Image (spheres, grey):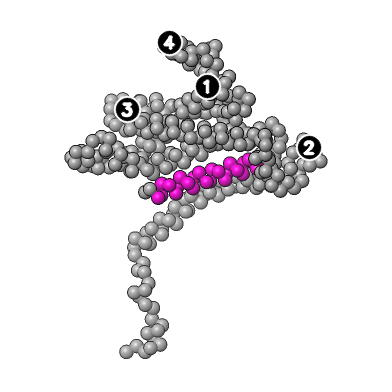
Amino acid sequence: MATIDEARDTPDRQTRPPKTRRGTLLAQDRRLGYGLIAPAIILLLAITAYPLVYNIWNSFHYAVPDIPFINGKLAGLANFRRMFTTGSVFVPALVHTVLFTIVSVAIEVSIGLVLALALNRPFRGRGLVRAAVFIPWAVPTVVSAEVWKEMFDPQQGFVDYALKLLHLGGSTTTWLANTDTSWVALFVADAWKNTPFVAIILIGGLQVIPAEIYEAAKIDGASPWRQFRRLTLPLLKPALMVALIFRTLSAFLVFDVVYIMSNGGPGTSTETLAYLDFNAFHVDNDYGFGGAISLVLIALCLLIAAAYTRIFRERA
């Protein structure tokens, strides 16, 4: 018979969770995942660490090489307060960025979902059609923006010519010369370039949905709309989350399309935060204000990604 001291020293097996084989395999998979992404994380940190630290330093200093007597002096929060002073261009640029992000993402995800559903169905020549649809995404953004800028040219552009040929309104519009039509041109160019990217992600999500689920739904008498609403959309949530996060962050940081097509104009009516940041660094040589804008952009992007993750996690 075991003594009281031996019983006290014996571990209580019932209070310890059993180390199952599944738990061991999950831990091994987790360590393997961390190991696989570690080189990429190290590389990204090596590339971004210095610019990030440099921007942080700039944002709290007067970093204006053109004004030597204040260059390098401590500014505290002056660069951040400057964003919200009367007459600041930061708030209008933030509004433009939010507007562009909401509208462009809504257009691209909606059309991308329709394209993905259509291209996921078997039909003759599907491979060729898929390749043709995905070509715009493969074209460099600078090239596509230049093409669309020429297409919206009122003298030689295809857009006005097509509208005139079809006897539609707007055939003599100078698209990039006024605010409203400039935004229309930017939305069209951005959607043409990035909608195929959304479609690619969503097609990948559709292809992992088992066909047996739809067969069972048909046997139960579910209509196509009910199948889409009750089966396709819930099972497509992971792919939708990826597409939304990537496109929202990309749209929020939009620069190249605005720079090439409208140059932030007319005036500053299409100026976005990334374009404003570019001007602060490369036109005004105000590295302090540019660094502050960069930090705000990083913080806003992190908030957007966290919000998307939380929303989809709660609805999962």
Residue 36: x and y in percent read 47, 50
SS class of the residue under badge 4? Answer: loop
Mark number for residue 279? none
Q: Is mark 2 on a helix, strand or loop?
A: loop
Q: Which residue lies furthest to the right in this view?
A: 69
Q: Name the element at disc 1.
A: helix
CA gap between label 4 and label 2 equals 56 Å
Kindly identify which numbered label has been placed on residue 167: 4
- For discs 3 and 1, the disc positioned in front in the rendered view: 1
Of the numbered discs in the image, which one, if any, rests on residue 181? 1
| Residue at screen point 52% across, 15% down | 173
Task: Say few, some or many: other residues with alpha carbon within 10 Å of mark 3 (under 14 / 14 to 19 / 20 or more).
Answer: some
Task: Report how far apart the C-alphas of labels 3 and 1 lie in the structure.
Answer: 35 Å
Q: Nearer the viewer, mark 4 or mark 2?
A: 4
The residue at the point 58 percent across, 28 percent down is 270
Q: Nearer the viewer, mark 2 or mark 3?
A: 2
Q: Does the magenta stretch include residue 144?
A: no
- Amino acid carrying label 4: it is His
Q: How far apart are marks 4 and 3 (CA)?
A: 34 Å
**Is 311 one of the magenta-colored residues?**
yes
Which range is magenta?
Answer: 291-314
Name the residue that disc number 3 marks: 126
Is residue 62 among the parts visible in the rendering?
Answer: yes
Q: Is residue 54 visible?
A: no
Distance between mark 2 and mark 3 Cα atoms: 61 Å
